[in-house]
Amino acid sequence: MPVRLSVPAAAARQQVAPITVQRRIRAGILPAVLVDERYEIEVADLDRVFVPRQVVASRESDDPLTPLERAAARVAAEAPPLTDAARERLRELLGGVL
């Protein structure tokens, strides 16, 4: 039987806020089962959707990125992998850049 976690436990496992897990459930990105009025998430699904983030220690003065670039990098690190259809759509929107 697959191991399931509650939203708070899943969030703690992935080191994110519970609202992040809830948003991914609502968006249909993270499969979940409703049990007694609370969501439960299979660990395999959780690990598939939440890609581990690489943590690199650096001093601010050594960081060549602007705050906007750092924010974009954080968002990209938390985004689920692109499907082939999404990649093709982005290619169309960006004029073949991807």
Image (spheres, grey):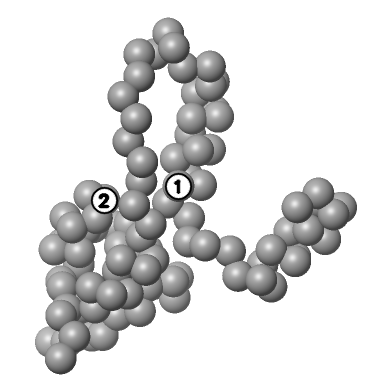
Q: Which mark, residue 37?
A: none
Judge whether residue 23 can be spotted in this image. yes
Q: Is residue 29 left or right of residue 13?
A: right
Element type at marker 2?
loop
Image coordinates of residue 30 in percent, x first then y, are 37, 72
Q: Residue at x 48, y 34 (%)?
A: 71
Q: Nearer the viewer, mark 1 or mark 2?
A: 1
Residue 86, located in which quarter of the rendered image? Answer: bottom right
Q: Secondary structure beneath disc 1?
A: helix
Relative height, residue 76 to residue 69 (above, below): below
Measuring from the top left, give residue 42's x and y in whole percent. 24, 78
Residue 32 placed where, x, y %?
29, 80
Res 54 → quadrant? top left
- In the figure, is residue 39 to the left or right of 54? left
- Identified at 42% across, 8% down, the residue is 61
Is 94 situated above or below 42?
Answer: above
Badge 1 amino acid: Ala
Q: Which quadrant of the structure image shows residue 31?
A: bottom left
Q: Is residue 38 visible?
A: no
Residue pointed to by mark 2: 16
Image coordinates for residue 5, horizontal then vertical, percent: 15, 73
Identify whether 66 is placed above or below 44: above
Q: Residue under circle 1?
A: 77
Farthest-out residue, right: 95
Query: Neighbour class for label 1 at 10 Å: few (<14), some, many (≥20)?
Result: some
Rendered position, 33 above or below 68: below
Mark 2 Cα within 10 Å, few/some/many (few <14, many 20+)?
A: some
- Looking at the rendered structure, the kind of residue marked 2 is Val
Q: CA distance from mark 1 to mark 2?
A: 12 Å
In the image as oriented, which residue stretches furthest toward the top?
61
